[in-house]
Image: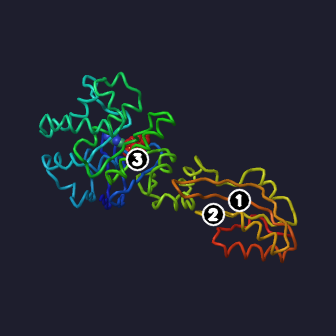
Amino acid sequence: MIQIRDLTKIYRGAAGEVVALDSVSLRVRKGEIYGIIGFSGAGKSTLIRCVNMLERPTEGSIIVNGQEMTTLYESQLRTMRQKIGMIFQHFNLLSSRTVFENVAFPLEISGVAKAEINKKVTNLLELVGLADKAQSYPSQLSGGQKQRVGIARALANDPIVLLCDEATSALDPATTSSILELLKDINRKLDLTILMITHEMKVISEICDSVAVIEGGKIIEEGLVIDVFTQPKHSTTRRFVQTIINTDVPDKIRERLLEKGQGQIIRLSFIGDNTAEPVVSSLVKHFDVDVNILYGNIDQIQDTPFGMLIIECIGAKANCDKAVAYLRKQGLRIEVLRSAE
Ligand SMILES: Nc1ncnc2c1ncn2[C@@H]1O[C@H](COP(=O)(O)OP(=O)(O)OP(=O)(O)O)[C@@H](O)[C@H]1O
């Protein structure tokens, strides 16, 4: 649905040149929720604003629904932008208009008839759960309600793509979750492709199918959220993952790794339904070893559980080695943190 190829954006000003995007390529499939995460200054806003040409790229190609965006004239761009909805961190509502009038605004600009506008706005306010606030003004709404108005307005022209620019960054955690749930709901009901930028891993883990990590204007890692979360390759990605799941070996256990001992210390990582419990009891039953569980955590990305367990396998070295060989065959990721003496 969105294909970006070798996108470069250079800002030129009195202070010199800033390369905000450096040959970025990515592909967003129809109907998916695609997240772009990065720290401040990484190039996220520039990237999302290039998709609807609010920012003109210096080089490269952006294709939305088969249409090359970089070669469009202003009037063609206006038509295309109606099909690319956008929501913003600070909502950008018109304060002198009611909720109803805010949502009606893009329809008025598109020249839609009044009766049609009434019907459409009523349905949209129903969809975002604000039917009872139609006559309120933005100043009378909470942050979450304002973002719901922003979402309804963005959907008014039946977009094929929704761009979300840090849409939950100004909201508290509970409101963030309810807005993310609404976006997921809309994505499913309308089969709407969503591209979002964020600096919060929670946003990615709650609703995104795919993720790209951006740093210094370059995409440093990209893939399905479950893959990137469970096997982050780049140190920046690991820092983001670390903000919501602890994949590090805790300090207490690190100290233990330095002590000499007869046990083998092993980290097992698992994704999906192959949880570690039956394998642990199998070790004890079949390899004449004792197993001491030192640390464990389990988490869930959307519907897929994943986690890790650090165990100490105590017994004769030959038995411990056989136990590790068995674990490797079970489809678990195994790392021997300390070998047996
Ligand atoms: N209009 C501009 N003129 C010059 N430099 C700019 C302009 N807009 C952004 N930049 C620079 O481009 C780089 C990328 O900025 P951008 O706003 O895209 O990053 P970001 O990841 O969205 O950051 P944040 O999360 O803080 O908004 C930064 O170095 C920024 O200072």
Few, some or many C-alpha atoms within 10 Å of disc 2 (few <14, some 14-19, many ≥20)? many
Percent position (x, y) of residue 200? 49, 44
Quarter of the image that includes the N terminus:
bottom left
In front: label 3 or label 1:
1
Q: Which residue is mark 1?
A: 309
Quote the CA–CA distance across marks 3 and 1.
32 Å
Give the residue type that dot 1 points to: Leu
Residue in the foreground of this view, choosing between 141 and 308? 141
Residue in the foreground of this view, choosing between 149 and 64? 149
Q: Is residue 4 visible?
A: yes
Give the residue type that dot 3 points to: Ile
Secondary-structure class at tag 1:
strand
Label 2 with label 1: CB-CB less than 8 Å: yes
Q: How many marks?
A: 3
Q: Residue at x 28, y 59 (%)?
A: 60
Instruction: Specify whether 336 is left or right of 319.
Output: left
Quote the CA–CA distance across marks 2 and 1.
9 Å
Percent position (x, y) of residue 128? 35, 38
Disc nearer the start of the sequence (3/1): 3
Compared with 235, 337 (above or below) is below
Q: Which residue is mark 3?
A: 197
Q: Residue at x 22, y 39 (%)?
A: 120
Q: Which residue is mark 2?
A: 270
Confirm or reject: label 3 Cβ below 8 Å from ligand 1. Answer: yes
